[in-house]
């Protein structure tokens, strides 16, 4: 487990990552290094990160407020202005040290500043390690609508160091774990079996590596999401709508990304049972597994109506139709399945049951 080669870059693990990063920084001759953090990764991750960096580089630390609520264009504007004030030029680099919000937003800011400067992802949450930091999707939310603004642009490298997880709380670990369960559901039934009985987040290295392999293989086959890459969106069509609804609705507590897509994966398993012959036993296995790990949300009929309205913003839509990635079996998917509204409501009834 040292590195995984992607299109134009590599994902390096643990000590190999710091070796690769130091080598790159020594060779690249950047004019300045900008390190993007939020207040939590500033406190918990920045010092251990800096302790691994050799050489005399010029640094600036840019801190933003944590949370999905700040993954927006206003935050980007603040950062672009800081970059400009601090004389960032096209030979500057941005190192994103944080969770998926930092890697998505930092990647977007770097990709658009002066038509694009280099960026490096150093994911510090489980979710960012196994999913968000790899694959080149960068961007921000528009209001509460998830990831509506963004570009696909690859980092220079990704450095996955699992030691950062020591300061991440259980709720956040569990949220990231949802994307790993997704990797099993869409690609690898044995991996699903292994993960679903896991009840400790110690020693995740081999599993993190396995998830990055799955994600990277899919992305390499279809970097711009014309076909096969869509499978990574399993659970996300309804999951994003649920996440957006909770983001905008003050009556509800915030749901984490992984918690929302865990719900989405149950709902979309029901659609799969109805439309793509997912066996009933698999459907029940999926529901039981997610409900044993994630809080069950009590949706009212009004909530469901509002969530379904948000579906029209899904990026997989075209010509007014909403398309889903569904499961044929655990480990096997079908893309571009059209679903009618009645069945969507039924899926919520199944979730609530
Ligand atoms: N680009 C992609 O392909 C992709 C894939 C999946 C998810 N995402 C995006 O990722 C985001 C979710 O990522 P996330 O769950 O990492 O969110 P996040 O960045 O908000 O991190 C979660 C929380 O953990 C804190 N944190 C991060 N690392 C820490 C550490 N080591 N110790 C202590 N606290 C730490 C953060 O400050 C934050 O409060 C969503 O916006 C989602 O849309 C993107
Ligand atoms: Zn996700």
Image: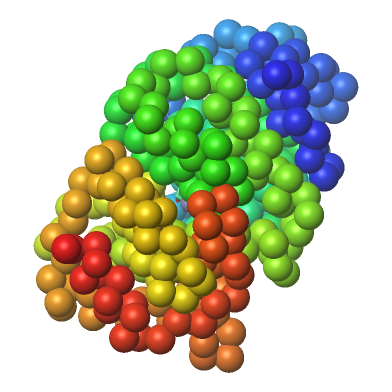
The spot of residue 284 in percent (x, y) is: 32, 54
Task: For residue 293, say whether it is visible.
Answer: yes
The spot of residue 261 in percent (x, y) is: 39, 54
Q: Quadrant of the N terminus?
A: top right
Residue 173 lies in quadrant = top left
Look at the picture and state if 105 lies above or below 333.
Answer: above
Residue 191 lies in quadrant = top right
Task: For residue 109, say whether it is visible.
Answer: no
- Relative depth, front residue between 292 and 35: 292
The spot of residue 171 in percent (x, y) is: 29, 34
Look at the picture and state if 238 lies above or below 32.
Answer: below
Is 208 positioned to the left or the right of 22 in the image? left
- Relative depth, front residue between 72 and 84: 72
Residue drawn at (24%, 62%) of the image: 351
Q: Quadrant of the C terminus?
A: bottom left
Look at the picture and state if 202 lies above or below 7.
Answer: above
- Relative depth, front residue between 214 and 84: 214
Color scheme of the displayed model? rainbow
Residue drawn at (78%, 54%) of the image: 221
Is 123 positioned to the left or the right of 26 in the image? left
- Relative depth, front residue between 92 and 144: 144
Residue drawn at (63%, 16%) of the image: 14
Residue drawn at (78%, 50%) of the image: 220
Is 45 positioned to the left or the right of 351 in the image? right
The spot of residue 30 in percent (x, y) is: 79, 29
């Amino acid at each position: 487990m040292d590195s995984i080669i992607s299109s134009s870059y590599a994902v390096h693990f643990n000590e190999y990552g710091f070796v690769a990063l130091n080598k790159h920084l020594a060779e690249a001759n950047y004019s300045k290094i900008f390190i993007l953090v939020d207040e939590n990764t500033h406190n918990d991750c920045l010092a251990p990160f800096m302790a691994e960096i050799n050489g005399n580089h010029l640094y600036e630390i840019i801190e933003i407020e944590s949370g999905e609520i700040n993954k927006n264009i206003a935050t980007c504007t603040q950062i672009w202005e800081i970059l400009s004030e601090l004389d960032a030029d096209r030979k500057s680099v941005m190192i994103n040290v944080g969770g998926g919000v930092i890697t998505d937003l930092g990647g977007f800011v770097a990709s658009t500043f002066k038509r694009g400067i280099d960026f490096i992802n150093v994911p510090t949450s489980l979710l960012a390690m196994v999913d968000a930091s790899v694959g080149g999707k960068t961007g921000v939310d528009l209001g509460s609508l998830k990831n509506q603004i963004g570009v696909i642009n690859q980092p220079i490298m990704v450095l996955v160091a699992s030691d950062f997880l020591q300061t991440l709380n259980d709720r956040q670990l569990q949220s990231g774990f949802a994307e790993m369960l997704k990797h099993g559901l869409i690609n690898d039934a044995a991996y699903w079996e292994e993960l679903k009985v896991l009840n400790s987040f110690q020693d995740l290295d081999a599993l993190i590596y396995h998830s990055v392999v799955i994600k990277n293989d899919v992305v390499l086959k279809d970097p711009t999401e014309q076909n096969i890459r869509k499978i990574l969106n399993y659970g996300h069509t309804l999951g994003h709508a649920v996440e957006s609804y909770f983001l905008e609705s003050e009556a509800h507590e915030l749901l984490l990304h992984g918690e929302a897509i865990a719900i989405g994966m149950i709902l979309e398993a029901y659609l799969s049972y109805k439309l793509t012959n997912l066996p009933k036993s698999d459907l029940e296995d999926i529901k039981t597994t997610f409900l044993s790990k994630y809080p069950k949300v009590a949706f009212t009929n009004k909530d469901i109506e509002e969530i379904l309205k948000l579906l029209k913003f899904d990026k997989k839509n075209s010509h007014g139709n909403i398309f889903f990635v569904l499961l044929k079996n655990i480990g096997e998917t079908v893309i571009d399945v059209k679903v009618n509204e009645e069945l969507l409501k039924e899926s919520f009834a199944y979730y609530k049951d």
